[in-house]
Amino acid sequence: MQSNRPPDDYAHGHHDSVLRSHGARTVANSAAYLVPHLATGARVLDVGSGPGSITIDLARRVAPGAVIGIEPVLAVVEKATAAIPDEVDNLTFETGDVYALDQTDASFDVVHAHQVLQHLREPIAALREMRRVLRPGGVLAVRDADYGGMVWAPEKPALTRWMSIYQSIGARLGVDPNAGRHLLGWTMAAGFERIEPAASAWTYATPDQRRFWAGTWAERAVASDFASHAVEMKLATEADLLEISEAWRSWEHEPTGFFLIPHTEILAWR
């Protein structure tokens, strides 16, 4: 199938620093709420599978059930495919359009999407398409952060500026960085009736956690599509972005450094 919609412009892009951040995600740290509903032999579609770390974990948990991960960018699909371990033989990655999935009606037991809806101009349309490919009784699992609910300490003006720029980029792209708070309403609007909303959080507070989070964002602030969008939209200069990058490096070494990312988690049954 092919969508008539113009492609969404992904705010982060696919720089190595972005994929490195996404590659640290697993079912345990990003989809634990789904685990009780992963049955052996289940057929799973992972929408927006990125580098594939969650998808590979899903495949292990439902084997021998078939798992498909889809991404719109071929280079990302190729990288994810190359990362499939030899022993995981029930997983394929494909290019795909969330608004026009190639999969047939009622063909999956589980449809999963992690940090996807915040990057879509039409999240309800995407959810309707995910619902279409779910079998009756199948479960949708979507999880998105809420940038407006993120908190950190100590305060640093450049990090406050980072958040303002990010929110402005989202507004210009027509997407909602604060998607977490809207997931319940979007899922209801997509036609789901049995819905279980919940929430969880990521925290970065130990030295190793700060090193990882600050390290990826220090690079992303100057090298990813976040940086190019900010400059092209005249939301920041390269000097501003360098200051933000340096603030991340500084925050990393704060002994009281703390960063919290809230997530909404939705389970919904067709």
Image (tube, rainbow, N blue to C red):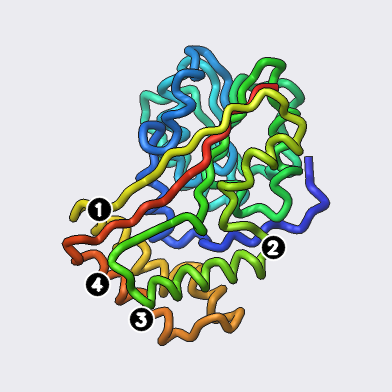
The circle drawn on residue 174 is: 2
Label 2, label 1: how far apart the Cα atoms are: 32 Å
What residue is shown with label 4? Answer: 250
Between marks 2 and 1 in the image, the one whose residue lies nearer the viewer = 1
Amino acid of disc 4 = Ser
How many other residues sit within 10 Å of disc 1, few (<14), some (14-19) or many (≥20)? many
How many other residues sit within 10 Å of disc 4, few (<14), some (14-19) or many (≥20)? some
Q: Image quadrant of residue 246?
A: bottom left
Label 2, label 3: how far apart the Cα atoms are: 27 Å
At x 50%, y 46%, the residue is 50
6 shown above or below 144: below
Between marks 1 and 3 in the image, the one whose residue lies nearer the viewer = 1
* Callout 1 touching callout 3 (CB < 8 Å): no
The circle drawn on residue 243 is: 3
The circle drawn on residue 230 is: none
**Numbered disc total:** 4
Label 1, label 3: how far apart the Cα atoms are: 22 Å
Amino acid of disc 1 = Ala
| Label 1: element kind | loop
Sequence-earlier tag: 2 or 3: 2
Q: State whether residue 77 appears in this view.
A: no
